[in-house]
Image: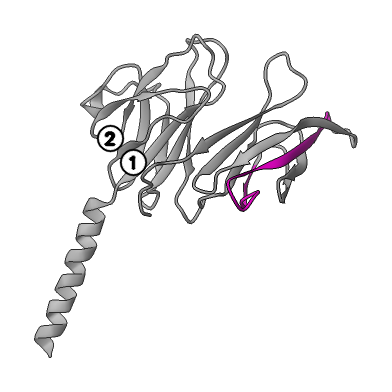
Amino acid sequence: MFFWVSLLCCLLSLTTAYAEKTAVRTCRVLFLNGPDSAPDTLHLFDGARSQEVDLPRMNLSKVYELPAGPLTLRLLDKPVTDPKDLPASAPSASVTETMLDLYLLVTSVSTDPSSPLRIQVINANSDQLRTGQMLWFNLTPQDIGGIVGTQKLMLRAQSRQVMDPPANNNEEYEVNLNYRRDGSESLYPLCETKWRHDPRGRNLAFVINENGARTPRVMVFPDYREKPESR
């Protein structure tokens, strides 16, 4: 009996070790509203190696793989192999060991291409953002509210919210959003349109302010993967 219990424990340990070893951590990058003069690519250093990553403005990048364990990610102008060579000014963000799927949100401090960048890690594990759901970010000082398909949206200033699927199938749905301006109780139109729901993917939605524009802008980025990794 003892032999079989020991054998079972050994097999379970080997299975767990194999799963940890073969687990793939994925990352997609978005340069939210980056100026045209900013670079199209940078190098992402994970503590051991650098890889060149795209900085798309209007869609998510391709899927990049990152090593397991806790990480400190840094964006660099050129590849680095020795951590001693890292510039102190390189933007950085921490990734916890349990975060196996993430978005790396890159923003520019100003429209000046020489100004520093900021990076933010968004947890995209399946227990945080499921297929069909939307993750909303309100990056403005105004409250946002309205209807997104079958869901109601109430998004306070500088907040985020996970929204359940706005439709059941691959179909169009109504979107009607408003915002409050400068603390006023009046509602102002923000977005009235139709979007299409893809139940196979997830969506990142941002409400941002643009220079010179009084009305905020809504930007939605779909994340559909032909062969989604198991989480």
* Residue 190 shown left or right of residue 95 in the figure: right
In the displayed structure image, the side of residue 70 where residue 120 appears, left or right: right
Amino acid type, callout 2: Gly
Q: Dot 1: what SS?
A: strand
Q: Which residue is mark 2?
A: 47
Depth order, front residue of 138/86: 138
Q: Is residue 67 above or below residue 221?
A: below
Q: CA distance from mark 1 to mark 2?
A: 7 Å
Disc 1 + disc 2, Cβ < 8 Å: yes
> In this orientation, does residue 218 appear?
yes
Mark positioned earlier in the residue sequence (1 or 2): 2
Using the image, determine if residue 129 lies above or below residue 104.
below
Task: Give the vertical position of 213 relative to 158 (above or below).
Answer: above
Q: Amino acid at mark 1?
A: Leu
Colour style of the rendered protein structure? one colour
Where residue 51 appears, x then y in whole percent?
Answer: 28, 27
Residue at image position (48%, 21%) is 117
Residue on which disc 1 sits = 71
Residue 170 picture location, percent across and down: 58, 46
Tell me if residue 97 comes above or below residue 83 in the rendering.
below
Q: Which residues are magenta?
A: 160-182
Q: How many discs appear? A: 2
On the image, the x and y values in percent for residue 56 come to 46, 23
Q: Is residue 143 one of those drawn in magenta?
A: no
Tell me, for residue 174, which label it has, or none: none
Label 1 packing within 10 angstroms: few (<14), some (14-19), many (20+):
some
